[in-house]
């Protein structure tokens, strides 16, 4: 069984390769549709520039080459996993991305754990206590947090918990200049993590709670639940073994989507909380027309999407053994 | 996005706008400077590089001017002061300038600073790579180094503005031993610079902060006072405001916090507005008109726009008083060296300005149509933030009153540069320009016909070409008599306003918000773009 799963993932990944390549090609040309190039941005930021200066930058960035030459050299690099160089930052794209990966992973990971756990729990409770005051409160809470703009939640948290109460710092990932090490440094990061993670969780938690509730309600109405009840199984056993396991599938799908989007980070939360993650990096590189960097982030994101999809499909089969791995060519 | 921004603003106003906190006079304690401490500044956007010999981007300059020194500094009257150069003599014909350099200065890596560094930095780096290098050092043909502490500048012709362009902001001295024979732009030292300045580069966490540490061997004895300088990058304006409100940040530079928010923060007991420190930058906000295309190829239409806009309203309502109405291209910040004048200048703030505007438009043959509009134009506001978009909205309303139908085109930065500055696809665009300490260095490029160049953004984008104006600019480049030179500038001020290829709206105050525990923040005409070696923190 495990061998089959491993082979399945591998096959999925191999079949994902052409998709990833197609994404790279489309991205490469799509980005170039936006007017303006990196040399103009840099010269513009400088306030004034001479013609030689602009020509110098273009030559250095390779922007003076014909498009197909730029494309060929980019593709050559990509197949060897060389993401290229960000001339704007004067560094390798891979090192720029790698530097920001940690911050993004911590934030998204924390938000993921909080939102999946609490969301599933709240959704299940709301379904079990359907049409009670508890369920109404949960549903209203979910709708409100789902509909509230993220930046507003973020600013509210900052105003209440950072400015008024002074419990947490307003922004950043570490206390800059404090030079903490060891455990103190870990605590410092966690201290900074609380507000952004809570802000980001609100949205996803609401999503999971709503999904879980409706899925659970549907499951509870199924024949096999009635059968289980008729067999005389206890409430707890019915819920955990029969209902929860089936109801959690849509949540799983959604969580897969969340993981896929992880590399993009959350531009809004990173921006409001000054969190130095990948979302902001992508956002800034778009406005700077830092094409290599942007393509690098897109490239890694597309890989993550393909991998996550394969993994989620496998997890399905574990949660629900009725779903079989189909390694055939007809569907996938 | 627009409505989000608006609602956030409204929200801030409602929740936080209850300006509690007593209005204390900004009394500076007359205590002796206390050494030590960390100063945390926030600025935006994060610079791409921090060596300003290669870029004059504002935030690059904010960082690099702490790390590098220039040959000269300037006092608040814009008179040159010694820095790496201790003294200088100018030959009677103005073509030879001899600088005596300070002895015993070392680079951050311990190597001695010599005249060879000056020669290399100015001729091989700044003149070639700095975007304003040609303007600042163009006529300098060579620099001789007869000994380790003498640098002799040989000029093709007298060039008075040269002495105004030798600060660490314009002509930073970079080390020869690090850069010579390397590909300058890709040298790793570009983002971990070695200088002679008051602070040493320590580290850069991209997307987060840059840390500079005190240079223990700085040549100014006992300076800098601060142990450490941290520059933080936070993407959101409201979060920056929260940071300075809570005391996590000591100084927020201009442009990091919206003007309306600055007015709120100003009322808090521990915060103040730091004025000054932009005298040598002399920033002016303006509307550039495309004079090669109808309708602004007609001077009467340009003047009608100039009359139709209320500069006082723009200053007060859009920029919340952080500036004052401009007279013309040459800012009153240049009063110190006499280049500024407001005599014989056409004024647009007259009582019957709307009637005059309407009359001018009638004379230009632009009759009102059925909808009351005479002509339609495109306005591309500078993509510098919401305040600029709001000014665009005001311009649309104000010009509608005289029958000019304005369509706003808000674009992102690269698109804006390409379409407006590269393709000249616009009628009217807003921007701000730094005048620098001398009109030849900063103001000239707006209207000199030789700076009309599609390839280079932020030059003469109006494509204004007037032989009389050209002649005056060129005369000012070589005139060594200060009085005669100022007369030329006064004539330019008069001519340019009367022709209005550009509508100069407001002299900007590039104020910062600061915590009151920070003392002596602004001590030079470069302000936060200076070395900050006199700045200290009260504990």
Image (cartoon, rainbow, N blue to C red):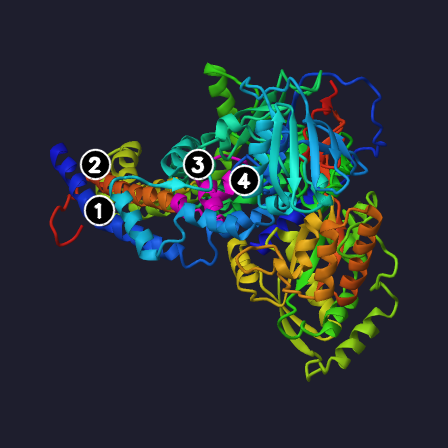
Task: Bin the neighbour count of mark 1 within 10 Å (Cα to Cα): few under 14, some 14-19, many 20 and up.
Answer: some
Magenta residue span: A266-294
Q: Is residue B190 left or right of residue B366?
A: left
Task: Bin the neighbour count of mark 3 within 10 Å (Cα to Cα): few under 14, some 14-19, many 20 and up.
Answer: few
Q: Give whichever of A323, B340 is nearer the camera.
A: B340
Q: x, y (%) of residue A308?
A: 28, 41
Disc 1 and disc 4 on one polypeptide chain: no
Q: Which residue is mark 2?
A: A318
Q: Chain of mark 4?
A: B
Q: Which residue is mark 4?
A: B54
Q: What residue is at 56 percent from the left and 51 percent from the top? A: A50
Q: Is residue A307 above or below residue A50?
A: above
Q: Chain of mark 1?
A: A
Q: Write down the quadrant of residue B416 in the picture.
A: bottom right
Q: Which residue is mark 3?
A: B183
Whether residue B381 is visible? no
Q: x, y (%) of residue B126?
A: 57, 39
Q: Of discs 2 and 3, which sits in the foreground?
A: 3
Q: Is residue B311 left or right of residue B291?
A: right
Q: Give whichever of B347, A296 is nearer the camera.
A: B347
Q: Is the magenta region chiefly helix, strand or loop?
A: helix
Q: Is residue A280 magenta?
A: yes
Question: Marks 2/3: CA distance?
Answer: 57 Å
Disc 4 and disc 2 on one polypeptide chain: no
Q: Which residue is mark 1?
A: A17
Q: Of discs 2 and 1, which sits in the foreground?
A: 1
Secondary structure under tag 4 reads loop
Secondary structure under tag 2 reads helix
Question: Marks 2/1: CA distance?
Answer: 25 Å
Q: Chain of mark 3?
A: B
């Amino acid at each position: 069984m495990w061998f089959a799963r491993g082979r399945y993932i591998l096959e999925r990944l191999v079949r994902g390769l052409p998709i990833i390549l197609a994404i790279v090609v489309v991205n490469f040309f799509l980005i170039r549709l936006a007017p303006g190039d990196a040399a103009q941005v840099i010269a513009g930021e400088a306030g004034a520039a001479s013609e030689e200066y602009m020509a110098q930058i273009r030559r250095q960035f390779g922007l003076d080459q014909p498009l197909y030459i730029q494309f060929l050299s980019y593709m050559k690099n990509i197949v060897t996993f060389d993401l290229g160089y960000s001339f704007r930052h004067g560094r390798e794209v891979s090192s720029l991305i790698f530097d920001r990966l940690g911050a993004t992973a911590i934030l998204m990971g924390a938000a993921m754990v909080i939102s999946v756990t609490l969301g599933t729990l709240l959704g299940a409770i709301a379904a079990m206590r359907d049409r009670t005051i508890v369920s109404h409160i949960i549903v209203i809470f979910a709708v409100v947090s789902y509909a509230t703009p993220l930046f507003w939640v973020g600013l509210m948290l900052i105003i209440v918990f950072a400015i008024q109460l002074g419990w947490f710092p307003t922004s950043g990932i570490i206390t800059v200049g404090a030079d903490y090490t060891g455990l103190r440094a870990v605590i410092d990061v966690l201290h900074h993590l609380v507000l952004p993670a809570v802000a980001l969780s609100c949205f996803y938690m609401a999503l999971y709670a709503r999904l879980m509730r409706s899925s659970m309600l549907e499951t509870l109405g199924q024949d096999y639940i009635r059968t289980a009840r008729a067999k005389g199984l206890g409430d707890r056993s019915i819920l955990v073994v029969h209902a929860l396991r089936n109801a959690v599938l849509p949540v799983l799908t959604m969580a897969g989507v969340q993981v896929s989007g992880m590399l993009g980070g959350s531009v809004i939360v990173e921006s409001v909380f000054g969190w130095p993650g990948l979302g902001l990096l992508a956002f800034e590189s778009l406005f700077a027309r830092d094409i290599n960097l942007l393509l690098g982030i897109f490239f890694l994101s597309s890989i993550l999407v393909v991998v996550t999809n394969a993994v989620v499909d496998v997890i399905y089969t574990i949660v629900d053994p009725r779903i079989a791995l189909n390694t055939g060519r007809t569907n996938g | 996005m627009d409505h989000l921004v608006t609602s956030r603003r409204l929200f801030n106003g409602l929740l936080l706008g209850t300006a509690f906190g007593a209005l204390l006079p900004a009394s500076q304690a007359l205590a002796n400077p206390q050494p030590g401490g960390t100063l945390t500044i926030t600025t935006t956007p994060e610079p791409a590089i921090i060596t300003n010999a290669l870029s004059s981007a504002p935030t690059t300059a904010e960082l690099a001017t702490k790390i590098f020194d220039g040959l000269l500094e300037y006092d608040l009257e814009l008179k040159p002061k010694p820095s790496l150069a201790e003294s200088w003599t100018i030959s009677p014909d103005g073509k030879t300038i001899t600088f005596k350099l300070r002895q015993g200065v070392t680079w951050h890596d311990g190597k001695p600073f010599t005249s060879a560094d000056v020669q290399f930095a100015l001729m091989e780096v700044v003149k070639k790579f700095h975007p304003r290098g040609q303007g600042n050092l163009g006529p300098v043909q060579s620099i001789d180094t007869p000994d380790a502490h003498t640098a002799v500048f040989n000029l093709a012709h007298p060039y008075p503005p040269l002495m105004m362009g030798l600060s660490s902001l314009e002509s930073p001295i970079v080390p020869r031993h690090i850069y010579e024979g390397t590909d300058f732009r890709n040298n790793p030292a570009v983002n971990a610079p070695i200088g002679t300045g008051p602070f040493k580069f320590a580290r850069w966490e991209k997307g987060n902060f840059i840390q500079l540490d005190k240079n223990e061997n700085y040549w100014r004895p006992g300076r800098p006072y601060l142990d450490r300088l941290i520059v933080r990058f936070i993407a959101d304006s409201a979060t920056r405001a929260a940071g300075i409100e809570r005391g996590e940040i000591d100084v927020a530079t201009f442009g990091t916090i919206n003007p309306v928010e600055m007015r709120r923060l100003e009322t808090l007991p521990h915060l103040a507005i730091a004025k000054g420190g932009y005298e040598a930058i002399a920033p002016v906000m303006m509307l550039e008109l495309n004079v090669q295309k109808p309708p602004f190829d007609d001077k009467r239409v340009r003047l009608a726009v100039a009359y139709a806009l209320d500069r006082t309203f723009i200053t007060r309502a859009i920029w919340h008083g952080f500036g004052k109405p401009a007279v013309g291209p040459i800012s009153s910040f240049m009063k110190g060296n006499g280049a500024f004048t407001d005599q014989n200048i056409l004024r647009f703030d007259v009582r019957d300005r709307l009637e005059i505007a309407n009359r001018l438009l009638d004379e230009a043959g632009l009759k009102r149509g059925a909808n009351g509009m005479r002509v339609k134009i495109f306005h591309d506001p500078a993509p510098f933030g919401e305040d600029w978009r709001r000014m665009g909205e005001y311009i649309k309303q104000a010009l509608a009153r005289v029958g000019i139908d304005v369509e706003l085109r808000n674009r992102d930065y690269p698109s804006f540069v390409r379409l407006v500055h590269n393709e000249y696809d616009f009628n009217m665009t807003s921007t701000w320009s730094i005048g620098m300490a001398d009109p030849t260095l900063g103001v000239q490029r707006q209207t000199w016909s030789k700076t009309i160049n599609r390839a280079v953004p932020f030059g003469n984008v109006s494509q204004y070409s007037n032989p009389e104006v050209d002649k005056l600019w060129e005369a000012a480049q070589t005139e060594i008599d200060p009085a005669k030179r100022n007369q030329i500038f006064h004539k330019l001020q008069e001519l340019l306003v009367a022709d209005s290829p550009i509508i100069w709206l407001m002299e900007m105050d590039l104020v910062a918000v600061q915590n009151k525990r920070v003392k002596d923040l602004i001590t030079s005409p470069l302000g936060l773009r200076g070395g900050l070696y006199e700045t200290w923190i009260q504990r």
